[in-house]
């Protein structure tokens, strides 16, 4: 490899790093703006200003406000998925303990709860977006239930049994609602109180 080719690769690498840094800054700024003003009230100029980048930089990475919003939600979900995937194993009892702790840690992420709420409100107003976002899920609910049962064991054999998939999704929805209520009733819905409620709900749904 010539020195010129080597230099070119180094420059490309530095360019890629700067590109990733800019994208990361834009998404971080977008999170703040979307939570503060909601999707409808958010302005790309505010995002660019907060990220200390130009509006053109946004269009260098995202096609529109909708595009950056969906990218932000998708990135959060992917980060959480990767984190829990690394912690799970073939040990069912250990997996239940790991998932319990993971769900409780979500109680500390107020921003994610509010972003989730904004996303749900957004899809209600833009139903066509549901189709686009569903593409992030490679498996059906039935397939995910099979995977969850293998990881966490089958649901309790009761008349009104709840599938592992429904249990997990319900816990996350419950947590999101509680964190939202905490914005209005911070003394009643303290972080400690929310963790206690979610822990009790988890134990009820996942007990043998």
Image: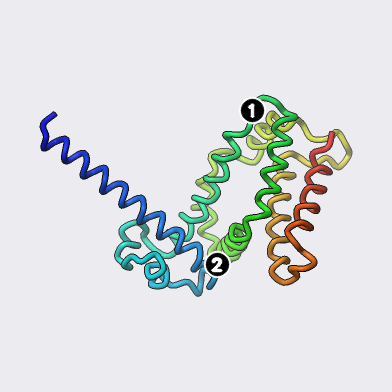
Measuring from the top left, give residue 12's x and y in whole percent. 23, 44
Q: How dense is the environment of label 1, judged by Cα within 10 Å: few (below 14), some, or many (20 and up)?
A: few
Q: How dense is the environment of label 2, judged by Cα within 10 Å: few (below 14), some, or many (20 and up)?
A: some
Measuring from the top left, give residue 141's x and y in whole percent. 64, 41
Query: Is 48 rendered above or below residue 81?
Result: below
Q: Nearer the viewer, residue 128 or 30?
A: 30
Proximity of marks 2 and 1: CB atoms separated by less than 8 Å: no
Which mark identifies residue 35?
2
Q: Nearer the viewer, residue 40 or 97?
A: 97
Q: Nearer the viewer, residue 42 or 133?
A: 42
Q: How many marks?
A: 2
Relative placement, left or right, of 92 versus 29 is right
SS at mark 2 in the image:
helix
Residue at 74% in and 68% down: 186
Query: Is 169 rendered above or below residue 192?
Result: above
In the picture, residue 13 is in which quadrant?
A: top left
Residue at 69% in and 39% down: 99
Relative placement, left or right, of 96 versus 158 is left
Residue at 79% in and 35% down: 155
Which mark identifies residue 89?
1
Measuring from the top left, give residue 85's x and y in whole percent. 58, 35
Q: Looking at this view, name the residue that lies furthest to the top.
A: 90
Residue at 16% in and 39% down: 7
């Amino acid at each position: 490899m010539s020195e010129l080719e080597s230099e070119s690769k180094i420059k490309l690498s530095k360019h890629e790093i700067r590109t990733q840094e800019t994208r990361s800054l834009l998404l971080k700024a977008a999170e703040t703006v979307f939570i503060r003003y909601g999707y409808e009230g958010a302005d790309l100029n505010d995002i660019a200003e907060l990220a200390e980048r130009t509006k053109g930089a946004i269009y260098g990475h995202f096609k529109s406000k909708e595009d950056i919003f969906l990218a932000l939600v998708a990135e959060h979900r992917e980060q959480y998925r990767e984190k829990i995937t690394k912690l799970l194993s073939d040990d069912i009892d250990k997996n239940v303990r790991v998932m319990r702790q993971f769900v409780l840690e979500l109680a500390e992420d107020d921003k994610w709860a509010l972003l989730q709420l904004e996303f749900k409100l957004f899809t209600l107003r833009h139903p066509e977006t549901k189709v686009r976002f569903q593409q992030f899920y490679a498996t059906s609910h039935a397939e995910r239930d099979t995977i969850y049962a293998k990881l966490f064991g089958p649901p309790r054999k009761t008349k009104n049994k709840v599938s592992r998939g429904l249990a997990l999704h319900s816990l996350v929805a419950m947590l999101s609602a509680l964190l939202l209520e905490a914005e209005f009733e911070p003394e009643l819905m303290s972080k400690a109180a929310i963790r206690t409620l979610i822990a009790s709900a988890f134990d009820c749904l996942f007990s043998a």
